Image: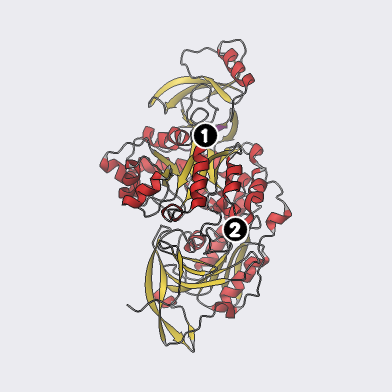
Amino acid sequence: MTRTFEEIKTLVETGLGRRPCDRKLRNVRLVNVCSGEIYPTDIYIQGRRIVSIDPEAQLEANEVIDCGGQYALPGLIDSHMHFESTMLSPEALANLVVPKGTTTLCADLMEIANVAGEEGLRAMLTCLERLPCRMLIEVSSRVPTAPGLETTGAELDAEAVSRILSWPESVALGEMDPSKILLVKDEYLQKIQTTLAQRKIANGHAIGRMGQELNVYASAGLSDDHECVEPEELLARLRLGMRVLIREGSTERNLDALVKGVLEAGLSCENLCFCTDDKHAIEILREGHINYNINRAIQVGLDPMRAIQIATVNAARHFRVEDEIGSITPGRLADILLSPSLEDIQPSMVLFEGRVVSENGTMREPCQVQSYPDWIKDTVHLKKPVTADTFRIPAQKERVRVNLIELIDRQIINRWTTAELDGESGVLRPAPERDIAKLAVVERYGKTGGVGLGFVRGFTLRRGAMAYSMSHDHHNIVVIGCNDADMALAVNTVAELHGGLAVALEGQVLDSMALPIGGLMSEDTAEAVMAQLDQMNLAAARTGCTLPAPFMTLSFISLPTVPELGITDLGLVDVNAHRLIPLEAEEP
């Protein structure tokens, strides 16, 4: 984004009328997020940048676009997201979010980094110059996420993180969970120090932490948190000088509660940003992207200007790039969207760095998905054959009390509870009639062949099995099922696809979907992926599952850094204590 000498000189000469502008947006109502005003004017653009927004300016332009009095807003910024969770390549994702008005994605690439390391990051970033939007990098701080508790495909040590932070796209250290700070792990403190020394920020992931623990966490230099669920958590972070990134993803729906809390307490919005974190393509198409966050916040009661500031200039200031993006002001990059309405932002036109890239919800020229290297499409290797016996859990008693993951609706956090299960014929069985299914994680990098086994309540599975090669953040194959044979079939199908999704029922594969790029992403267009995912969701419904985003939920069940229980290829994880625990629970 660096300004060149020639750019600066050309802007000055253009503003002085010595050469014509490339483009003039005539008759807009400018949403000035710096002054908080809305007023009629024209916008003059030269190359990538804005020359003038002066209502009295009379500059010549090679192209004049009559905007008919529409609102002109700065391009929207997603302050924290993982593009891999969309199942789309960066190119296909750009084709989906740009028509919604998003021109900057702040992406933590920890998913592909856990699979393929620094080499994987380089492979994914070869597309940047061709994208019709900007991707800024939050350098993954925890690869692996839970050292010693999981098997990953790669690691990023402090030296690698320091090296990647120097890349021009890098603006922050990616999200870091509290265990790395509260357990005083030198490697992670070194990563923070390296980041701060470069005058960049360190992203947080302080899920569930309050009081002195949160103070200690903030004191290490963490700048934000996107894991707030309750207004009390938001306020606690604002009081400590942290920014709160209000998240609205596919399964993590936090916006309503947090915005209502802000309004009821009369809090300032200047330290709030919006993010999606993890949102499937199908929800982006149907709801929107960051424009949905703005629209929903307005519906909840937030003033439109404040909602737009949260999505633009606030995020730019947070990442210390407000001199380049986040506002429609002279010298900034011309990322602009036009909308007929401020209360329901549906862009009629989107400009990225001065070029019209989208009109009426359609890309002018869709970004083509490049051919990714063969090695990054060959990351699934089962060390041992997976059969029904792989998931067999011996039982020494007729009734066994187990530690159980209990899902919480529309959140990624869960409850650690216990339940008694039947030990029939020496084998521990799930209890679908009580909404308790078997859960397993199968190591998929060909390193150990390990399989972690457990049980989960709240997935609403009644029969069959579902498997997915994205299981945060280690991305081994996670499978949930009501019988071992279907679980084995689903896992083997995913492996044969070199990564993806599968639903099995009564010995048959109902449907499957390939995600060959790192076992996480498709090579298809967004439209093709959404159509496939629709079919996968229909197949999941045949198992009895009623969740709105079953595969997104499945991908998060195993997360060993989100309270209270996780599961990896090594077994059940007590998240707060950062340790493995047995499946069988202690008697109450």
Q: Position of residue 70 (x, y in %)?
A: 46, 28
Q: Where is residue 72 in the image (x, y as percent from the top left)?
A: 47, 28
Q: In this view, does 90 lie to the left or right of 393?
A: right
Where 458 sits versus 138, above or below? Answer: below
Where 511 sits versus 316, above or below? Answer: below
- Mark 2 burial class by Cα count in 10 Å: few <14, some 14-19, many 20+: some
Find the magenta span and give its range.
346-351
Dot 2 lies on which element?
Answer: helix
Q: Does the magenta stretch include residue 338?
A: no
Most foreground residue, 491 or 179: 179
Q: Is residue 277 in view from this perspective?
A: no
Q: Where is residue 441 in the image (x, y as percent from the top left)?
A: 54, 68
Residue 269 in which image quadrant: top left
The residue pinned by badge 2 equals 532
User: Where, quadrant-wise, is the C terminus in this rendering?
Assistant: bottom left
Residue 222 in which image quadrant: top left
Dot 1 lies on which element?
Answer: loop
The residue pinned by badge 1 equals 348
Query: Which kind of residue does numbered mark 2 sit on?
Result: Gln
Q: Is residue 443 in view from this perspective?
A: yes
Q: Position of residue 506 (x, y in %)?
A: 57, 77
The answer to which of marks 2 and 1 sits earlier in the sequence is 1
Q: Residue at x 42, y 45 (%)?
A: 220
Colour scheme of the picture: secondary structure
Most foreground residue, 248 or 28: 248
Q: Residue 357 carries which label?
A: none
